[in-house]
Image: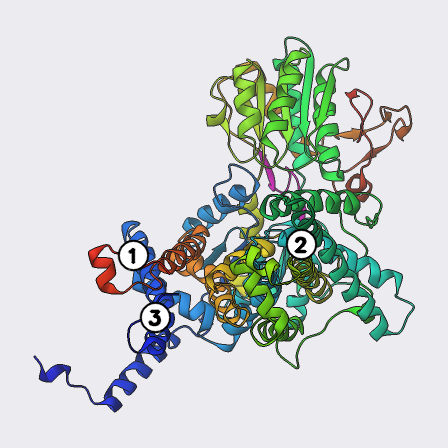
C-alpha cells in the first residue's frame, strides 16, 4: 500500500504530462466520412419561438437522417463569440456545413470566417446573400412566412365575431410590416370590410408592453389577435384570458392558449435543411440560395387549436392549397397604403419572392395604426 | 494589524496562494456535484472545459479574444475600488465608448490613419470617462452613493446609445437592424501577426501592468490606498481624497470606454446593440476575483474567458445547456468571495470560532 504511493518525481511528471495530453488525443477534427453540420442559435432552444423552430427541425433530422452528425449551440451572441463558435465547430468538430439562424451573424462575422475557411459551406437565414459581393461558399435560405400569416388572416376572418382584428408587432422592419399586411390581405380575401389594428411594442421581447398591447386591443373590441414578436407566451396567455382568438408563429403554440388558439404560421426548416444536407451527403455542390413558400414546402400551417371550427379548418386548407398551386396571389392590385398612396395598380400582381416585397415600408389600407 | 505569529510573511504568502486555489477547487467540486446531479459525468465536463478553453492554440485564441475587453472593463471597477468605491458603470461606459469611437473615426476619416485612430480611441476614452467620472464627481461633491449612481448611469447610457443608434446616427441602408455607419477602413484595428488576436489584448495587458505600478509603486497609489483604508484619516494628513475619487472614476471609465472603442474598431466594425453583451458587468466580477489587484486581473480574466470559451464545446459534446458555464462562473465568484472571509484566520481560530480582528 505504502509502496504503491512511492512515486519517483520523474514518474509523477510523466504521469501528469500524460494526463494533460490525454484529453488532446481524440479531440482533433473528426473529419471522417460522416458529414458534420452545425447550427447556431441566438436564443435558447426552448424559447417557444424562432430558435425552437430550428431546434425542432434538427430534432426531426436527427431521426430522419441519422448518418449525419449534428452540432447545435444556443445563445450565441451576435458578436465575435459567433466567429469563435463557427471556428470551433469547424476545427474541433470537423463541421463542413454551418447554418446561421440569426440575422446579425451575417456581416461581418460569417463573412470573415467564410473567407478564412473556403472549403466549409455557410448558409445564413434571411436573404442577405449577394452573389456579386459575398464569398462563393456562403449563401442564404428563407421561407416566406408571410404567406402562412395570410392564411391565418383567412382563418381570423372566419372566426371573428366583432369583425375587428388586431396585431402586436415588435419593430417596424420590412419583415414585420409584411406580416401585418399579409394578415390583413388574408382577412380581406374573405371579407373586404375587415380591419387590422396594429400596436408596435418597439422591441422583440418586452412582455409588459405585449400584455398592455393585447389588453388594449381587447378593450377596443378586437377579438382576433396575431403577432410578430420573439416570444408569444404573454400575448397568447392574455388573449385566452380575454376570450380572444389567437394565432401562433414559428412553432406550435397551441398549448399556450388552450381555449382560443386557431392555427399558426410555421417554418418548415427541416425541409430546407434536409435539401442542403442531402446534397452534402451526396457530394454534390450546394445551392447558394434556397427560398420558397408553400409550393416548395418551406412554410406550412401549424396544427389546429381548440378554437378551429370545421368551417375554419376547411377555409385554411383551401387557402393553403390555392397558394401552393399558385392559383391565389396574395399581393394583387389594386392596393393602396393607409395614407392613400398607390402600392400596386389594378391588374398587377407580384410573387412572394419579388424583391420589392422585401423592402416593404408601408401599412396597407385597412390597417389601423402608423409606422412609429 | 495585530502582532502576528512567527513566520508572518511566509504564512501570508501561503495564505494568498491557498485561498484562491482552495476556492477554485471548491467551486469545481460544487459544479461537479450539480453536473452529477443532472446525470452527466463531471470529469468529462472538466475535460471539455480544459479542451475548449486551454487545450489548443485555437482554444487559447478563443479565450484570449474574450479576455481583451475584460482586462479594461475590470480596471473600471478595480481603480475606484482602491478608494473603497464599488463602481458598476462599466457596461454603459463600454457602449458609449464604442459609439463615440465610431463617430470620431468617421469625422476624422480624412485625416491620416494614425490621427484617425488616435481621435477614435480618445473619443472612446472621453465618453467612458465622462459617464463614470460623473458618478465619482457626485460622490465627492454630494456624497451620492457611487454604486447606485453608476448603476443608474448604465441605464441612462444605454438608453442614449439606443436613441442615437436608432435615430440620428443610423445607417439607413440597413432596414432590418439599427447600426451606425462602419468604422473607416484605415481606422480598423488589426490582428497581432498571424494570430486571431487583435491589439486590444496588448493594450489591456499594458493597462493592467501600468495600473499596478501606479497603485503599488507611486505616492499617488499609496494615497489612494490610504484613502481607501480610512478616508477621514487620509483627509487629516492632507491627502486630496475628493480629487483622487474623481480621478480614479474618470480613469476607470476611460478604460471601459477604451475597451468599447477597441472592440468596435477590431471586431464589430459598427456600433449596434451587440455592444451591450455584458462585458462591463463581467469586468466587475473579475475585479472582485482579483481582489482589485490589476496584475491578478490578468489570470482572473483568462480563467473567466477560458470557461466562457469552453461553453460551446460543452453544449455540443455533452448536450448541457448554455447556462452550464454561467453556473460555473457564478460558483467561482461565490467561492472566491467566501474564501476572502477566511483571510487572516488560522485553522485553529476557525475551529474554535475565535475570529481574529485585523
**What x and y, as percent, mark residue A67?**
42, 59
Picture residue at 68% right of the left edge, 39% below the top: A144
Along the polypeptide, which appears first: circle 2 or circle 1?
A: 2
Foreground residue among B287 and B281: B287
Q: Residues within 10 Å of mark 3 (few under 14, many from 20)?
A: some
Task: Establish if A118 lies above or below B132.
Answer: below
- Res B15 label: 3
Camera-side mark, 2 or 3 = 3
Task: Establish if A163 lies above or below B10.
Answer: above
Along the polypeptide, which appears first: circle 1 or circle 3?
A: 3
Picture residue at 61% right of the left edge, 33% below the top: A206
Location of mark 1 (residue)? B355
Foreground residue among A84 and A303: A84
Camera-side mark, 2 or 1 = 1
Camera-side mark, 1 or 3 = 1
Magenta stretch? A289-300
Chain of the residue displaying label 2: B
Location of mark 2 (residue)? B275
Picture residue at 51% right of the left edge, 77% below the top: B57
Chain of the residue displaying label 3: B
Say whether residue B104 is magenta: no
Along the polypeptide, which appears first: circle 2 or circle 3?
A: 3
Q: Between marks 2 and 3, how big is the CA–CA gap? A: 39 Å
Picture residue at 65% right of the left edge, 37% below the top: A145
Which of the 4 image quadrants contains residue A366?
top right
Amino acid at each position: 500500500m505504502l509502496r504503491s504511493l512511492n512515486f519517483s518525481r520523474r514518474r509523477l511528471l510523466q504521469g501528469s504530462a500524460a494526463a494533460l495530453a490525454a484529453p488532446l488525443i481524440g479531440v482533433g477534427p473528426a473529419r471522417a466520412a460522416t458529414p458534420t453540420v452545425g447550427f447556431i442559435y441566438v436564443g435558447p432552444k426552448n424559447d417557444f419561438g424562432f430558435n425552437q423552430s430550428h431546434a425542432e427541425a434538427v430534432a426531426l433530422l436527427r431521426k430522419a437522417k441519422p448518418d449525419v452528425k449534428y452540432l447545435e449551440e444556443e445563445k450565441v451572441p451576435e458578436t465575435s463569440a459567433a466567429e469563435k463558435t463557427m471556428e470551433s465547430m469547424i476545427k474541433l468538430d470537423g463541421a463542413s456545413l454551418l447554418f446561421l439562424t440569426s440575422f446579425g451573424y451575417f456581416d461581418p462575422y460569417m463573412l470573415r470566417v467564410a473567407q478564412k475557411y473556403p472549403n466549409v459551406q455557410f448558409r445564413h437565414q434571411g436573404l442577405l446573400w449577394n452573389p456579386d459581393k459575398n464569398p462563393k461558399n456562403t449563401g442564404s435560405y428563407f421561407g416566406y412566412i408571410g404567406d402562412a400569416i395570410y392564411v391565418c388572416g383567412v382563418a381570423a376572418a372566419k372566426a371573428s365575431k366583432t369583425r375587428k382584428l388586431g396585431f402586436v408587432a415588435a419593430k417596424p422592419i420590412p419583415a414585420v410590416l409584411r406580416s401585418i399586411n399579409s394578415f390583413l390581405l388574408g382577412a380581406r380575401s374573405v371579407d373586404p370590410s375587415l380591419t387590422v389594428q396594429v400596436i408596435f411594442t418597439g422591441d422583440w421581447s418586452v412582455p409588459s408592453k405585449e400584455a398592455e398591447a393585447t389588453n388594449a386591443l381587447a378593450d377596443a373590441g378586437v377579438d382576433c389577435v396575431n403577432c410578430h414578436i420573439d416570444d408569444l407566451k404573454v400575448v397568447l396567455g392574455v388573449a385566452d384570458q380575454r376570450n380572444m382568438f389567437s394565432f401562433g408563429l414559428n412553432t406550435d403554440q397551441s398549448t399556450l392558449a388552450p381555449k382560443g388558439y386557431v392555427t399558426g404560421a410555421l417554418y418548415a426548416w427541416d425541409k430546407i435543411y434536409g435539401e442542403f444536407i442531402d446534397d452534402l451527403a451526396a457530394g454534390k455542390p450546394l445551392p447558394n440560395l434556397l427560398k420558397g413558400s408553400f409550393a416548395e414546402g418551406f412554410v406550412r400551417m401549424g396544427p389546429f387549436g381548440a378554437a378551429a371550427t370545421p368551417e375554419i379548418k376547411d377555409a385554411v386548407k383551401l387557402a393553403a392549397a390555392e397558394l401552393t398551386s399558385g392559383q391565389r396571389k396574395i399581393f394583387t392590385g389594386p392596393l393602396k397604403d393607409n395614407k392613400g398612396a398607390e402600392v400596386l395598380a389594378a391588374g398587377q400582381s407580384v410573387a412572394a419572392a419579388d424583391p420589392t416585397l422585401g423592402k416593404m415600408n408601408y401599412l396597407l389600407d385597412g390597417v389601423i395604426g402608423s409606422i412609429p | 494589524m495585530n502582532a502576528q505569529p512567527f513566520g508572518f510573511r511566509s504564512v501570508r504568502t501561503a495564505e494568498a496562494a491557498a485561498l484562491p486555489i482552495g476556492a477554485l477547487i471548491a467551486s469545481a467540486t460544487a459544479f461537479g456535484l450539480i453536473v452529477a446531479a443532472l446525470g452527466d459525468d463531471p470529469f468529462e465536463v472538466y475535460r471539455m472545459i480544459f479542451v475548449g478553453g486551454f487545450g489548443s492554440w485555437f482554444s487559447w485564441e478563443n479565450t484570449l479574444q474574450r479576455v481583451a475587453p475584460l482586462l479594461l472593463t475590470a480596471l473600471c471597477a478595480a481603480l475606484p475600488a482602491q478608494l473603497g468605491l464599488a463602481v458598476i458603470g462599466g457596461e454603459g461606459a463600454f457602449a458609449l465608448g464604442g459609439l463615440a469611437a465610431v463617430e470620431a473615426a468617421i469625422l476624422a476619416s480624412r485625416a491620416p490613419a494614425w490621427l484617425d485612430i488616435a481621435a477614435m480611441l480618445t473619443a472612446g476614452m472621453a465618453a467612458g470617462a465622462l459617464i463614470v467620472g460623473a458618478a465619482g464627481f457626485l460622490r465627492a461633491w454630494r456624497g451620492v452613493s457611487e454604486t447606485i449612481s453608476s448603476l443608474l448611469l448604465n441605464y441612462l447610457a444605454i438608453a442614449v446609445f439606443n436613441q442615437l443608434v436608432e435615430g440620428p446616427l443610423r445607417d439607413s441602408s440597413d432596414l432590418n437592424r439599427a447600426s451606425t455607419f462602419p468604422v473607416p477602413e484605415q481606422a480598423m484595428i488589426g490582428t497581432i501577426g498571424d494570430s486571431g488576436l487583435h491589439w486590444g489584448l496588448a493594450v489591456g495587458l499594458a493597462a493592467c501592468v501600468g495600473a499596478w505600478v501606479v497603485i503599488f509603486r507611486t505616492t499617488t497609489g499609496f494615497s489612494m490606498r490610504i484613502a481607501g483604508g480610512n478616508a477621514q484619516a487620509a483627509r487629516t494628513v492632507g491627502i486630496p481624497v475628493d480629487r483622487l475619487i474623481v480621478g480614479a472614476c474618470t480613469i476607470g471609465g476611460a478604460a471601459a470606454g477604451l475597451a468599447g472603442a477597441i472592440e468596435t474598431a477590431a471586431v464589430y466594425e459598427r456600433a449596434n446593440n451587440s455592444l451591450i453583451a455584458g462585458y462591463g458587468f463581467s469586468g466587475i466580477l473579475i475585479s472582485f476575483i482579483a481582489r482589485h489587484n490589476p496584475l491578478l486581473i490578468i489570470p482572473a480574466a483568462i480563467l473567466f474567458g477560458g470557461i466562457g470559451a469552453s461553453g460551446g464545446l460543452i453544449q455540443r459534446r455533452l448536450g448541457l445547456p448554455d447556462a452550464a458555464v454561467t453556473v460555473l462562473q457564478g460558483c467561482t465568484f461565490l467561492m472566491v468571495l467566501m474564501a476572502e472571509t477566511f483571510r487572516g484566520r488560522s485553522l485553529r481560530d476557525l475551529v474554535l470560532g475565535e475570529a481574529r480582528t485585523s
